[in-house]
């Protein structure tokens, strides 16, 4: 089981994870923080669950995760207008925090896949799901859900992208407490960076995205577009080079051809 004391010793943040809620089992950590009845309004609150009965990814896909093997957690942000209105940058910051932590601790080379996945050797290791609560067209709170395959050694069923885990790639078991603390420490660092230079976040994200310049397909809600992954614009949207020119993609599922 997750050792809260070991985690707490390694956490070095001002606000992220300082309010920490632990569940052995819950439907979804995102759902818990989004639920207004829980009256949780402390920015930086982290909810970690050993097992989610209704874990989900983007487009309501099921997120499967073995109990007590991985990291499935959510982070709450409230009362920060500039942060709440920069969801793409929050997403990129979370991805960079996970990727840099895995690289720093285990010398693996994670890649970032637009818009919200972390890959190792072109296999999915982590997914990020950002959800919001809005009132009168204003965002009141943002929840950043992160699921990381840490120590799971086998994956069954059908997946949109082939899965792997840090343990599989590293060849040995990983201390989840140390990894989570490192991620939260780095996430706070990137959030502080957002206040001064968003361009740095975009540029660092692009350096870790190996699919740029490649032929890709992007599945939208009602069609599939094909082209070259040309760039990411200043807002974090994908620029797809097609036979008709450059198209801006704000949301979709990206696959390498």
Image: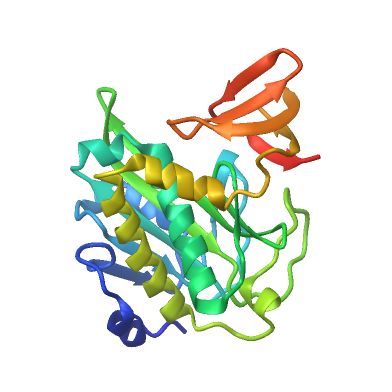
- Answer with left or right where residue 192 lies relative to residue 106: left
Please name the residue shown 47% across and 35% down the image.
Answer: 236
Hey, which residue is sitting farthest right in the picture? 257
Please name the residue shown 60% across and 85% down the image.
Answer: 173
131 or 28, nearer to the observer: 131
**Residue 248 rendering spot, x and y as whole percentages:** 57, 22
Q: Is residue 223 above or below residue 32?
A: above
Numbered-mark total: 0
- Answer with left or right where residue 126 lies relative to residue 24: right
Residue 4 in view (yes/no): yes
147 or 111, nearer to the observer: 111
Q: Is residue 52 above or below residue 201?
A: below
Please name the residue shown 65% across and 26% down the image.
Answer: 240
36 or 70, nearer to the observer: 70
Q: Is residue 195 above or below residue 25?
A: above
Residue 130 in view (yes/no): no
**Residue 197 rendering spot, x and y as whole percentages:** 31, 43
**Residue 103 rendering spot, x and y as whole percentages:** 53, 70
Please name the residue shown 29% across and 84% down the image.
Answer: 9
């Amino acid at each position: 089981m997750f050792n809260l004391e070991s985690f707490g010793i390694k956490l070095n943040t001002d606000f992220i994870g300082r309010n920490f809620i632990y569940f052995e089992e819950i439907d979804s950590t995102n759902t818990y923080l989004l639920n207004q009845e829980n009256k949780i309004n402390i920015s930086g609150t982290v909810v970690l669950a050993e097992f989610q009965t209704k874990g989900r990814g983007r487009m309501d896909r099921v997120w499967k995760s073995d109990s007590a093997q991985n990291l499935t957690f959510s982070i709450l942000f409230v009362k920060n207008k500039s942060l709440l209105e920069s969801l793409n940058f929050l997403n990129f910051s979370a991805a960079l925090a996970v990727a840099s932590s895995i690289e720093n601790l285990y010398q693996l080379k994670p890649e970032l896949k637009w818009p919200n996945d972390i890959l190792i050797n072109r296999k999915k290791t982590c997914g990020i799901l950002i959800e919001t609560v809005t009132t009168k067209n204003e965002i009141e709170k943002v929840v950043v859900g992160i699921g990381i395959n840490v120590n799971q050694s086998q994956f069954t069923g059908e997946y949109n992208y082939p899965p792997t885990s840090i343990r599989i790639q590293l060849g040995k078991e990983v201390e989840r407490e140390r990894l989570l603390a490192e991620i939260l420490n780095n996430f706070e660092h990137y959030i502080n960076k957002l206040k001064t230079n968003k361009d740095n976040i975009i540029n660092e994200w692009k350096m870790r995205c190996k699919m740029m310049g490649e032929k890709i397909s992007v599945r939208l809600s009602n069609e599939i577009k094909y082209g070259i992954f040309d760039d990411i614009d200043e807002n974090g949207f994908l620029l797809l080079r097609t036979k008709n020119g450059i198209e801006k993609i704000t949301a979709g599922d990206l696959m390498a051809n």
